Amino acid sequence: MYPSTDEKVYIDAAERLMVKVMARYDPSHDAFHVRRVRKTALAIANALPLTPDLLTVELGMWRDFLSVTYTEF
């Protein structure tokens, strides 16, 4: 069953980091936005005839908070 105990560790760590990073930016891409995108992506993945690796789908939230728009170099 998804997520496994090990997968939950990675998801929780990513969630904590995402909340910390996204708190610095405007609300158009805040933690609520990332959670909505993640929820939608998981719903689509679960509706597919062949379910993809859900951890990969889940960690797609990295896309927003590691975006060049929000990353300081």
Image (cartoon, grey):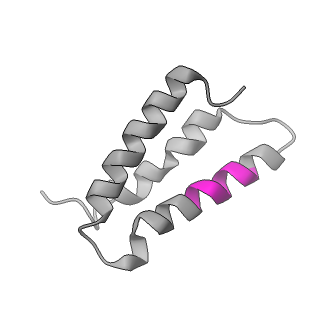
Residue at horizontal 65 percent and vertical 54 percent from the top:
41
Task: Say which of 44 and 7 sits in front.
Answer: 7
Q: Position of residue 12 (x, y in %)?
A: 44, 39
Residue at horizontal 51 percent and vertical 21 percent from the top:
6
* Numbered circles on residues, count: 0
Quarter of the view holding residue 37: bottom right
Q: Position of residue 50 (x, y in %)?
A: 82, 35
Q: Position of residue 48 (x, y in %)?
A: 82, 45
Query: Above or below — where is 29 with respect to 1?
Result: below
The C terminus appears in which quarter of the rendering? Answer: bottom left
Query: In the shown orientation, is residue 16 left or right of residue 39?
Result: left
Query: Above or below — where is 60 with respect to 55?
Result: below
Q: Is residue 42 magenta?
A: yes
Quarter of the view holding residue 38: bottom right
Residue at horizontal 43 percent and vertical 54 percent from the top:
63
Residue at horizontal 35 percent and vertical 56 percent from the top:
19
Task: Say which of 54 and 6 sits in front.
Answer: 6
Residue lying farthest to the left in this orientation:
73
Quarter of the view holding residue 22: bottom left
Q: Position of residue 11 (x, y in %)?
A: 47, 37
Range shown magenta = 37-44
The N terminus appears in which quarter of the rendering? Answer: top right
Per the picture, the main secondary structure of the magenta-coloured stretch is helix
Q: Is residue 34 magenta?
A: no
